Image (cartoon, grey):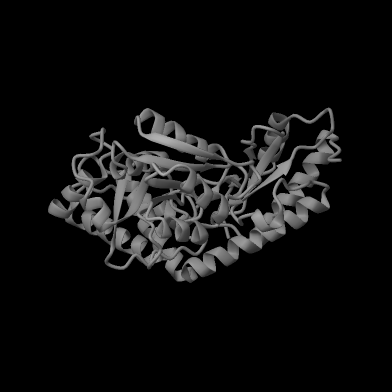
Amino acid sequence: MILGNDPILLTPGPLTTSPATREAMLRDWGSWDAAFNRITQSLCADLVDIVHGDHDYVCVPLQGSGTFAVEAALGTLVPRDGCVLVPNNGAYCARIVRILQRLRIDCVELALREDEPVTATALEQALIREPRITHVAQVHLETSAGLLNPLDEIAAVCKRHRKGLIVDAMSSFGALPIDLRASGIDALVSASGKCLEGVPGMGFVIVRRSVLDASEGRSPSLALDLYDQAAYMRKTTQWRFTPPTHVVAALRCALDRFAAEGGQRARGARYARNCAALIDGMQALGFRTFLRADAQAPVIVTFHAPRDPKWNFSDFYAAVRDAGYVLYPGKLTQVETFRVGCIGAIDANEMRNAIAAIGRTLEQLDLRVQ
């Protein structure tokens, strides 16, 4: 599907983008320009539509990485006297805990293994044990391992117990089905440089209007105040502070390509084919996946590192990079791993080419996988 002599990014974002998306950044835009502001409005409307937010939800874009948007959502939407339950099965769940600690918002961790999805039963038991909990902050797809948490089941428990639910959908938005209708989800957070296949630089929060309206004056941050950002954009159609104009233009192009491909269902199906080709090929080389198949999301796959004493990820990375593919280091705390992304403007044939390059690298470095 790609594109010149640049390496293919087999990473969870930034990722390989289409030539058209990159070309969309060649034009300069004025931040007050009416045409640019219409682009912002159109992409916000499209982002809400992707998850069936209808008129009950509004999209608030924000400058910066996805973590900026996660912190903005927590700082704006959770009251100062609130208490947030964080099911923790990976590095990005742990990051939410750190954000809450910096915000001085009370939190409770539900500790899970890095290969263990949260269950409705475990979540319900935690809510019963800790009646002071007002909100749940859930990572939908824990990218440190590629672990998929069951969002619909989690949302149902939160709705039944009348707890606010803030979802980090950073690596699932656009690839996996999410339906906000009757879900009870307060807010969904993602970013431009993930499964929408834009470039990094813009986060966004799709938030229930009534929840956003109740958050005026709550954020401890000026720049990360979602309420102020939304109110200013509603009043002026402009961003409060200098917007990432080229990123926004690229995302507009990426969303057009997303729709032309067939939306979430088609995008998710392509990634699933990529993932299947990756796992089949890597297993044929002797690599073992970290996760069980029923917990694996088709976005990024974690593999156990070879047991060969000569194994060194930096050397392996450099050799595969020289062959045209960029891999990702492991992010687990207990075992040595590395990760390979399945997303971006690539197809299953490109995945098979990557596996062939990895096979040649094993021979070049004289590495035995098992």
Q: In this view, does 175 lie to the left or right of 307?
A: left
146 above or below 314? below
The quadrant of the rendering that contains the N terminus is bottom right
Q: In which quarter of the image is residue 111?
A: top right
Is 92 placed left or right of 339 in the picture?
left
Residue 233 location (% of width, % of height): 19, 51
Residue shown at the point (21%, 52%) measured from the top left: 213
Q: Which residue is drawn at 78% across and 40% down?
A: 361
* Residue 162: percent from left, percent from top: 37, 55
Depth check: give the residue in front, 124 or 98. 124
In the depicted view, which residue is nearer to us: 60 or 113? 113
Q: Is 370 drawn above or below residue 206 in the view shown?
A: above
Q: Which residue is drawn at 73% across and 48% down?
A: 289
Left or right side of 147 for 71 = left
Q: Is residue 300 at all visible to an observer of this figure? A: yes
- Give the tally of numbered discs: 0
Q: Which picture quadrant has residue 145? A: top right
Q: Position of residue 199 (x, y in %)?
A: 43, 48
Quadrant into which the C terminus falls: top right
Residue 53 vertical position relative to residue 12 in the rendered view, above or below: below
Residue lying at the far left in this picture: please name it: 235
Residue depicted at x 42% and y 36%: 107
Residue 175 seen in the figure: no
Q: Where is residue 276 in the image (x, y as percent from the top left)?
A: 70, 60
Instruction: Pick the residue in front: 364 or 57.
Output: 57
